[in-house]
Amino acid sequence: MKKSTLADLSLLAVTFVWGTTFVLVQNAVNILPPHTFNAIRFFMASVFLFLLIISFYREQFHKVSGKMLLSGIILGIWLYCGYAFQTIGLLYTTSSKAGFITGLSVVMVPLFALLLLKQRPKWPAVVGVSAAAVGLYLLTLSDSLTINRGDFLVLLCAVSFALQIIFTGKYAPNYPSMALSLIQISTVSVLSAISALMMEDWHKAFDHHTLLQPAVIWALLITAIPATALAFLAQTICQKFTTPTHVALIFSMEPVFAAFASFFWTNEVLGFRAFSGCILIFIGMILSELQPEQLFLSLRNKKISSTNR
């Protein structure tokens, strides 16, 4: 199996984990404030990665440099901004509109890749991204799209997630994956903790009655290790073998997995429009896999073969 194919399958597994944990996080943040939850979640993920590196990959610490530290902090800042803008924006807009606007990061990644990395996307990827964007619209949007303060904040969230993918593609090939992921995740934990101190009742982070509630325990355990530490480690590794545009398109599957998880866990039924959105996202992924040069070469060979007959 090619490394690029294995990378795509790994990123699809990451997206599956993110999508299926949505219900868990939603239940947990009703008990523990969002920034406080993220601070604990990313702190636990940081500790896990630190112990993993100390135990099996200690040599990566010797490769830490000032440039690597700065790169990890930049990734962490964009990742934190994505979570922060989305959380605050949800106070002023609907979750369906927030879901679609966040999904616009899929469309933004090729533009940023062109502007910042000089990577010109091929036409199948452009068509695939467009199909995925329409699919996200059908899957998540339920009312008229009007811009208010919440919509603008969630739009900044989409920009932040897109830039996190772009800069991961830029920095990941240059540094050890585990150490870079540790710096990124630790940055999110610190910034989330500062936000909690400034904007939330952070005392709940030390209230054992709150922390020991099953909804909080399960959400923290599942999101901290599989959905944070291992997920962003996998992203850092896999983006050495695939393009940012491709990563963004795979990540557009998150609302699809979330919709199916909601069906199985809360009996939420997909309507015709939402199901159509899922199909379009799948079509977008398939289109992104097409290599135009190979497609034209195959058609040309078939034409020559039929002519020779």
Image (tube, rainbow, N blue to C red):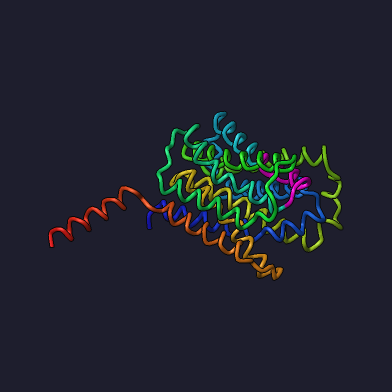
**Residue name at image x 34 percent, y 49 percent:** 292
Nearer-the-camera pick, 50 or 78: 78
Nearer-the-camera pick, 151 or 224: 151
Measuring from the top left, give residue 261's x and y in whole percent. Answer: 64, 65
Q: Is residue 298 left or right of residue 41?
A: left
Nearer-the-camera pick, 270 or 73: 270
Nearer-the-camera pick, 153 or 224: 153
Q: Is residue 189 visible?
A: no
Q: Is residue 295 above or below residue 309?
A: above
Measuring from the top left, give residue 108's x and y in whole percent. Answer: 55, 41
Q: Is residue 288 left or right of residue 92?
A: left
Residue at the top extreme of this rendering: 66
Measuring from the top left, give residue 93's x and y in whole percent. Answer: 75, 47
Q: Is residue 124 visible?
A: yes
Q: Is residue 240 left or right of residue 147?
A: left
Q: Does the magenta run of residues contain 84?
A: yes
Q: Is residue 7 above or below residue 187?
A: below
**Residue name at image x 15 percent, y 58 percent:** 307
Q: Does the magenta run of residues contain 266?
A: no
Name the quadrant containing residue 187. Answer: top right
Q: Quadrant of the N terminus?
A: bottom left
The magenta span reads 80-94
**Residue name at image x 31 percent, y 53 percent:** 295
Count of numbered circles in the view: 0
Name the quadrant containing residue 156. Answer: top right
Q: Is residue 83 left or right of residue 166?
A: right
- Per the picture, the main secondary structure of the magenta-coloured stretch is helix
Measuring from the top left, give residue 47's x and y in whole percent. Answer: 67, 48
Residue at the front extreme of this rendering: 144
**Residue name at image x 40 percent, y 44 percent:** 122
Q: Quadrant of the C terminus?
A: bottom left
